[in-house]
Amino acid sequence: MKTSHSIIILALGILVLSSCSQSNSPITVNKSATYYGESQPFANDSIRSWYKTDANGALTSIGVSFNQDAFSKLEMDTDVMLMMKLPNGINSPSGWNFDHVEVDWVPKGDPKPSVYDIAHLDVHFFGVSESEQMDIEGGADLLTTNMPKSYLPSDYMLDAESEAGMGVHAYDTTGKEYHGQPFDHSFVYGYYHGNLYFMEPMVAKTYLDSKTNFSADIKQPQSFRFPGAYPTKYNIRYDGSAKQYTISIDNFIVH
């Protein structure tokens, strides 16, 4: 009888130890997903914001998507301005975060003479709230003009003044539009009072009409004033099977 009890107790002990070992084992969860945000009417269809995460749940892409049919129906004499909230949950615990997207269809190009005086689409990814954006004043912005040069990417040039509701645009002067060739696409930074407010892929209608996929590095400042996840690439894509355009910022790195 004693031998029988010992065997039973030993077996129970092995079972308990085995159970504890299994419960403490790490569990791998794939958090790769696409989260869809606000949709807005766009010509005869709609445009939608979204963001993507990798298997670890880290931010990889933020973008907007719209159908070819919607784009082809946009009027050539009417500006369009849309504000779209990004999906909940995009924000990192602290630091600089993306809040919303402003999409602008500019069929006649910039109102003032510039190299961007042809029909184009602007996609502004803002890191401030809509109310903070609306508080941006036009005119001189000395805090941006005199901000540390390390906050401005190499080869970028600041606009002379702030645009109301937008801020001070900074343009890449190595772009072909600054060297006697037509504008097709570019990447713009936006500042106000010396702080980064938005990041903006800008693309000409003629380039979108070509349905040509494009990917490029985003020139990075030497430093960022606020810690956060910042994109290192931007993409312009056309999916022929879905007949859909996508404009996005991608390959995020935490600074």
Image (cartoon, helix red, strand yellow):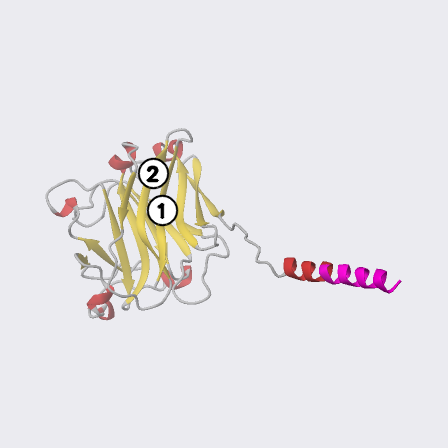
Residue 137 appears at what percent x and percent y? 30, 64
Q: Earlier in the sequence, mark 2 or mark 1?
A: 2
Instruction: Report the side of 246 relative to 185 (left or right).
Output: right
Task: Identify the disc placed on residue 237.
Answer: 2
In-image side of 157 versus 35 (left or right): left
Q: Is residue 4 magenta?
A: yes
Contact (Cβ within 8 Å) of mark 2 with mark 1: yes
The quadrant in which the C terminus is found is bottom left
Looking at the picture, tell me which residue is in the foreground, 106 or 68. 68
Q: Residue furthest left?
A: 180
Residue type for callout 2: Arg
Residue at 72% in and 60% down: 14
On screen, residue 40 above or below 212? below
The residue drawn where x is 31% and y is 68% is 225
Indicate whether residue 192 is drawn in magenta.
no
Residues drawn in magenta: 1-14
Q: Residue at x 24, y 55 (%)?
A: 219
Percent x, y of residue 114: 17, 48
Q: Which mark is residue 213?
A: none
